[in-house]
């Protein structure tokens, strides 16, 4: 029996000059109760007319069309609605792959390789699943972004009348704070560990759409005003907790900031009570997949929350709400062969158990990603200039597209990136990308390490897959590995990440707020193998904290 969606259908516009393709894609989407195809047109000019009517959440945009092609229509669509999510659809040619990545620098969020013939399209079950999953994931991400922005605006509006009268008194009695002293002790401690650049990302400001260009370093794709500090492990538990200080008059900005910070966990707690939704089979229960590994019980914020706002018709979060069977911390440490000394107890916050950070001799950096991965990779790699270690990447992507992705990584990040090849020697400071349809592994030790490719069966329904890459890195580098699991569907990287941790390495995952799909990073986080769960904008700084670099 087909499940009834718990949210309003996602509004989608299809733009393709082929009537056959439009008809087949429309039928594929119409069969899914969570999607409503509100328009199907044959060129960019007609798409603009539909967009003027409003309400469109996702546009599936063909590249080559008469009258107005996809690349010309893209900026015009975003001008009408900057929040609309545009997915480029193109056949598997090098030219179209290059155009798709150009479109992503202009504001498109993703691509989907289209079968080269209508016959292949009609029987392509893989294409249908990928299309539906990406449409749902990006529409859901848009709704959540707007929800965060609206909640922040509402909190600001509520705080403004209360703080306005106190402005003169605060200006007279309190000197202007430096370095964020007006924040509470926990927030100040957390910020002190970040780079200056990442602290700037935490400042209040309107959430903007991320545009990746070679000239400008953009903000992280989805930076809410409140960062999930409850997910962050305190690196020095032996330090005493901040003591209560006498209340002092606060400036209007500080009071507004405090009000927003208090309102944030309330909104999160409200969403946590809503039944979870997992669009397009995004992930299975991560705790079950992790073999019953411990997952923290508390999901409510530890500090008092303000009264919850009126119920909103916001979509439910993707994060699973059912807790996994509890196991002792000692049993959890026993599974991790190189766990730190028992004096440092794991941090349990926000429903995720974090392992203690530890100093390791990082010899290799590994990254796994899928849906939304190209944007996240550009952001992370741009911040890794100067690292001496080799960087190994598996991004779920077909052949041809990985070739173009490697070129764009080189051009946009300043790091030399190349697709992996058999027997390719490994050089420090370079990026190696798994080619489409091949698992990429590392063999050898010391100066004899080299890459190997294989077409073994897919793992986690993927080839290339993150797990075999991580297993081979553990065999070659032992525990001297730092792994980042970025946005993506499924749970690829979770089992390999556990091998990394058991060998003595560390894993960091992208947080839910900045992820398009919190599948892969969510599975790693709920498996209890992460030392940190961070916004995409903070991952490079975290890696450099342990791996060095200029």
Image (spheres, rainbow, N blue to C red):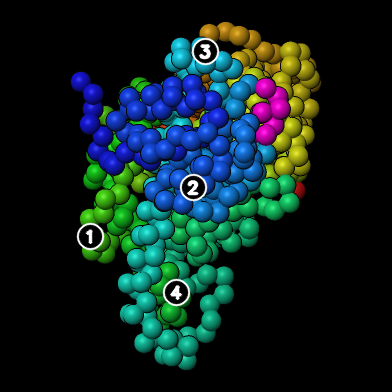
Let me know if residue 204 is in the magenta part: no
Picture coordinates of residue 125, whole percent (x, y): 44, 15
Q: Secondary structure at mark 4?
A: helix
- What whole-number distance in Å separates the C-alpha atoms at marks 1 and 3? 49 Å
Question: Which residue does the numbered mark 3 point to in the structure image?
Answer: 120
Q: Is residue 176 left or right of residue 248?
A: right
Q: Label for residue 49? A: 2
Q: Nearer the viewer, mark 1 or mark 3?
A: 3
Quadrant in which residue 544 is drawn: top right
Quadrant in which residue 244 is drawn: bottom left
Quadrant in which residue 422 is drawn: top right
**Residue at left offset 52%, top offset 60%:** 202
Q: Secondary structure at mark 2?
A: helix
Question: Which residue does the numbered mark 4 point to in the structure image?
Answer: 254
Picture coordinates of residue 430, whole percent (x, y): 75, 32
Question: Which residue does the numbered mark 1 point to in the structure image?
Answer: 310
């Amino acid at each position: 029996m087909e499940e009834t969606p718990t949210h309003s259908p996602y509004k989608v516009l299809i733009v393709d000059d082929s009537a056959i393709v439009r008809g087949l894609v429309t039928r594929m989407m119409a069969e899914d109760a969570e999607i409503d195809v509100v328009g199907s047109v044959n060129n960019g000019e007609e798409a603009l007319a539909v967009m003027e009517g409003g309400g469109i959440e996702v546009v599936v945009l063909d590249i080559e069309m008469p009258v107005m092609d996809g690349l010309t229509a893209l900026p015009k669509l975003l001008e009408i609605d900057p929040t609309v999510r545009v997915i480029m659809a193109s056949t598997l040619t090098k030219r179209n792959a290059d155009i798709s990545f150009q479109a992503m620098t202009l504001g498109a969020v993703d691509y989907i390789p289209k079968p080269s013939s209508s016959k292949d399209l009609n029987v392509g079950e893989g294409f249908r699943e990928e299309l539906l999953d990406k449409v749902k994931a990006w529409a859901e991400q848009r709704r959540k972004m707007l929800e965060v922005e609206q909640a922040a605006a509402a909190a600001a509006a509520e705080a403004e009348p209360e703080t306005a009268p106190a402005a003169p008194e605060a200006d007279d009695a309190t000197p202007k704070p430096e370095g964020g002293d007006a924040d509470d002790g926990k927030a100040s401690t957390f910020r002190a560990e970040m780079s200056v650049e990442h602290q700037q990302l935490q400042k209040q400001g309107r959430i903007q759409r991320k545009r990746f260009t070679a000239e400008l370093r953009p903000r992280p794709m989805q930076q809410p005003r409140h960062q999930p500090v409850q997910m962050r492990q305190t690196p020095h538990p032996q330090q005493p907790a901040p003591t209560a200080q006498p209340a002092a008059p606060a400036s209007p900005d500080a009071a507004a900031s405090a009000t927003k910070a208090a309102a944030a966990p309330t909104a999160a707690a409200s969403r946590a009570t809503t039944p979870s939704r997992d669009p397009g089979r995004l992930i299975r229960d991560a705790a079950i997949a992790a073999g019953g590994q411990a997952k923290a019980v508390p999901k409510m914020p530890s500090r008092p929350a303000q009264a919850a706002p009126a119920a909103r018709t916001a979509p439910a979060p993707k994060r699973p709400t059912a807790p996994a069977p509890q196991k002792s911390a000692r049993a959890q440490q026993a599974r991790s062969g190189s766990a730190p000394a028992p004096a440092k107890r794991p941090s349990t916050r926000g429903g995720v158990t974090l392992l203690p950070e530890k100093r390791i001799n990082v010899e290799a950096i590994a990254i796994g990603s899928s849906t939304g991965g190209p944007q996240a990779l550009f952001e992370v790699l741009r911040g890794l200039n100067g690292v001496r270690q080799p960087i190994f990447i598996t991004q779920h992507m077909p052949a041809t597209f990985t070739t173009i992705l490697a070129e764009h990584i080189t051009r946009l990040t300043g790091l030399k990136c190349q697709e992996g090849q058999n027997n390719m020697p490994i050089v420090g400071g370079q990026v190696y990308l798994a080619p489409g349809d091949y698992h990429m592994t590392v063999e050898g030790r010391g100066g004899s390490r080299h890459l190997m490719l294989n077409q073994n069966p897919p793992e986690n329904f993927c080839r290339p897959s993150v797990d075999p890459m991580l297993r081979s890195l553990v065999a070659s580098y032992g525990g001297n590995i730092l792994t980042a699991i970025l946005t993506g569907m499924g749970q690829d990287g979770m089992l390999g990440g556990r091998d990394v941790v058991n060998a003595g390495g560390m894993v960091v995952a992208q947080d839910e707020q900045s992820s398009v799909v919190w599948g892969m990073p969510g599975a790693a986080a709920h498996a209890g193998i992460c030392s940190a769960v961070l916004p995409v904008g903070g991952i490079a700084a975290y890696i450099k904290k342990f791996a060095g670099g200029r």
